[in-house]
Amino acid sequence: MNSTRLFKKTVIAATIALASQQALAAGFQLNAQSATGLGRAFAGDAVIADNASVMARNPAAMALFKETSMSLGVTSITSMIEVKDAKYTYADITNPGNGFHSTVDSNYSNAGSTSFAPNLHLIVPVNDKFAWGANVYSNFGTKTEFDDSFAGSEYGGLTDVKSVNIGLAGSYRLNEQLSFGAGLDIIYGSGKMERKLSKHLTHVPTGSLNPAYVDLSGVTALEAEASGWALGFNLGTVYEVDENNRFGLSYRYSPTIKAKGDVNYLSSGKGKIDDTLLMPLPSMAEFSGYHKINDTKFAVHYSVQWIGWSAFDKLEAEESGDLNSYEWKNGMHYSIGGTYYMNQDWTLRAGYMHDTSAQDELTSISVPDSNRNWFSGGFTYHLTTKSNIDFGFTYLLGQDVKVEESKAFSSITGTTRADAILVGLQYSRSF
């Protein structure tokens, strides 16, 4: 396989990996369906049911609503991505003393950006037993970009990913304690990646006894785009001990997306290449609890979530075969939070989450990942007895991760770190 074709396959693999996550979020799972949940680090979010956004975590919780309820919001995601202590080694026939290779520093201060993820949720009780709901929200929306100053740009460049989840669900109350729910998810994912060869990369022409190097500085290596649709489902149950204590359990099946990809790459002689990529998404299971302390204004809540990242062990295409290996491992979220019902106008909340990394031994410059800690706070202000505004804030703190990557003519080592700030605003009302 020639270096251009290998390079093309590596990049489109990374592109689709990003586009396929919950969403898959390239090992950077994003929760953006609720400003209320954001303010408590999503602790107890599958059972609290303080607004219609709960249906995104557990369809059975719709049985807790007595009136038609709607929530409309948006979450901003500001990612801060750093590459430090990085060394980029490239083929250089002008440097025979070092095996025709040269090494330069390849640090980068901020490859992150700000994106916005909207959400809309509606729950309609039909009677004392049945309720139905519909929602639209973005599971993932972010962008990373390394400009031309980054040495080793074939490992960075532009990555722009979006996903949309369209859901329809129903719930049934069996008795005063037990409720069930189920729903369908229509998932759309799209990804775009642009890569240029580094200004330092040189290529040794073949078939010549005295070759002169060709400087490929800034040449576009490829432009890759891929998108696709898939159908998933979710199940859930709620058990109410009493009005102040309840538990929720939910499961979300995530399918394999068949995404169409168009790739233009340098010196291939083939122009645009079309292929269908098979992208396995991780299924998830969550357990939540909510407990309001008797005769007080306080409540505690918690969640444990399992994410089946190991399903994404490799990326393959119908025509091209195996494109790249990832060998990710299953992940967990552990969150705990508290709510203070201060008065009829104000509700305050806070939470903490520990989120484990999807990546194991294989790591990446363009897809930085690590264990993460969420520190969250927020509030609800009640405009009337039937309407309110929610605000949520999270500082997501990542960890330093050592990275080693290589291609046909170059390699890079370094340390990546990805932090983020999430801010959510939401309007909710009942009818």
Image (tube, helix red, strand yellow):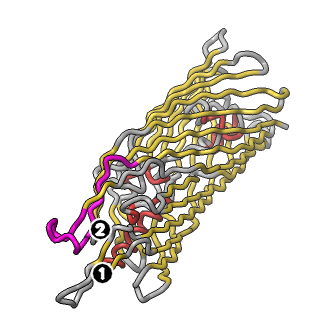
**Structural distance between the alpha carbons of marks 1 and 2:** 11 Å
User: Left of 67 or right of it: where is 326?
Assistant: left
Q: Reply above or below: 338 against 405.
A: above
Residue at the spot x=22%, y=67% of the render? Answer: 101
| Circle 1 Cα neighbour tier, 10 Å, few/some/many (<14 / 14–19 / ≥20) | few
Which residue appears at 79% of the width and 27% of the height?
382
275, 282: nearer the viewer:
275
- The kind of secondary structure element at disc 1 is loop
- For residue 5, above or below residue 186: below
The image quarter in which residue 290 lies: top right
- Segment colored magenta: 83-102
Secondary structure under the numbered disc 2 in the rendered image? loop
Question: Where is mark 1, residue-wise?
Answer: 2
Instruction: Report whether residue 330 is seen.
Output: no
Asked which quadrant contains residue 333, the reply is top left
Q: Quadrant of the C terminus?
A: top right
42 or 219, which is in the foreground?
A: 219
Earlier-in-chain disc, 1 versus 2:
1
- Residue 368 place in picture, x, y as percent: 41, 50
Question: Three-letter amino acid code at disc 2?
Answer: Lys
Disc ID at residue 407: 2
The residue sitting at 53% across, 74% down in the picture is 260
* Residue 63, image x, y percentages: 69, 37
Q: Is residue 50 left or right of residue 142?
A: right
Question: Looking at the picture, how far across and down is residue 308, in whole percent?
Answer: 42, 49
